[in-house]
Image: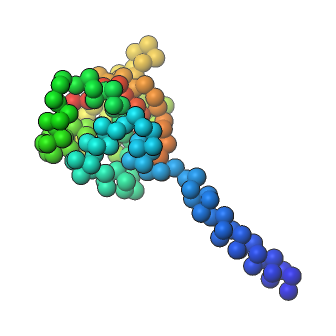
Amino acid sequence: MTRVWTLALALMASMLLLPAFAADAPKDIVGVAKDAGSFKTLCAALEAADLVGALQGEGPFTVFAPTDEAFAKLPAGTVEGLLKDKVKLAAILKYHVVSGKVMAADVVKLKEAKTLNGKAAPIKVEGGTVTVAGSKVIKTDIAAKNGVIHVIDTVMLP
């Protein structure tokens, strides 16, 4: 009888602790980007292009994520114009996404990455600096439950 009570207590304890472990699990790509605080423009663009749901999907995805500062480098009025042109915006955003989880150690071995908009983004490694479609990778391997984010310093244009 003691064994039954021990098993019952162990099951109840595991049920109580399960939510705590789930809370520690990484968020999806969109959640990680929102929590970072430096991707507000990217998140707004994903919403405007109706791509949030896709990047919250199972994946895995690799996202080359431009920071708010990267969007600020675009000519005045560009972001506002893109937010009004859903088709063009979606094409640009999909150029930042690769199917599969491609970690930094794998990115450096590639010459290009086929993006979700169908175009290949060229990858170059020179003197320890990695660029994707001319954008410098400034932070790598940010984990999400459905993929990985690599931070870039410039918005990539297909």
> What residue is shown at x 30% (from left), y 37% (from top)?
41
Residue 57 screen position, x and y as percent: 37, 56
Name the quarter where the N terminus is drawn. Answer: bottom right
Q: Nearer the viewer, residue 140 or 40?
A: 40
Q: Which residue is drawn at 34% across and 45% down?
A: 99
On the image, the x and y values in percent for residue 134 come to 29, 22
Eyeballing the image, is 127 above or below 10?
Answer: above
Residue sitting nearer the eye, 69 or 111: 69
Above or below 99: residue 72: above
| Identity of the residue drawn at 65% across and 70% down | 15
- Residue 81 relative to residue 152: left or right: left
For the C terminus, the image quarter is top left
Residue 53, horizontal then vertical, whole percent? 31, 55
Residue 100 appearing in the image: no
Given the current orientation, which residue lies at the most extreme bottom position? 1
| Percent position of residue 18, x then y | 62, 64
Is residue 72 at least partly visible in the picture? yes
